[in-house]
Amino acid sequence: MKIRIKGNSLRYRLTKTDVETFGRDGYLEESTKFGTSTFKYALQRTETEFLTADFTDNTITMYMPAALALEWTSTDRVGYENNSSEMYLLVEKDFKCLDNVAEDQSDNYPNPLVENFTKKKA
């Protein structure tokens, strides 16, 4: 799972394995060590109506409604967003980049734009 924060925008991108784990367990967490402190970010299935998030004990938790989680993990749906509060929230499946990048993308979803990108380069 990757996290992107910019201003009041929070985005999570999940690989195939991340989505499978979240679908099965209803919870996914990553952590990053900063010296003696640990920063965590998590996605948790919940009974709320919309995507929500909070920050407690050095952990950002995004809460995804159970009905949305079921649809998202069992279909081709790319993601969900909530832009009705002061913070914009987005959770989505992570696609392979169209350009060459150094990071391992073997567990990412096939990019639906790859055919168009290949045609433009030819």
Image: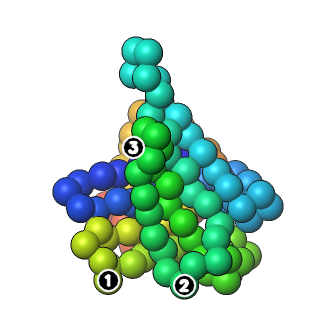
Who comes first in sequence, dot 3 or dot 2?
2
Residue 118 in view = no
Q: Residue at x 73, y 54 (%)?
A: 21
Residue, disc 3? 100
Mark 3–mark 2 CB contact (< 8 Å): no
Task: Note whether residue 43 is visible.
Answer: yes
x and y, in percent, of residue 56 in the image:
44, 47
Circle on res. 49: 2
56 or 46, which lies in front?
56
For image coordinates 45% across by 70% down, the residue present is 52
Say left or right for 111 vs 121: right
Q: Amino acid at mark 3?
A: Asn
Furthest residue toward top: 35
Mark nearest the camera among 3 and 1 is 1
Q: Which residue is mark 1?
A: 84
- Measuring 52% from the left and 34% from the top, which residue is drawn there? 31
Q: Earlier in the sequence, mark 1 or mark 2?
A: 2
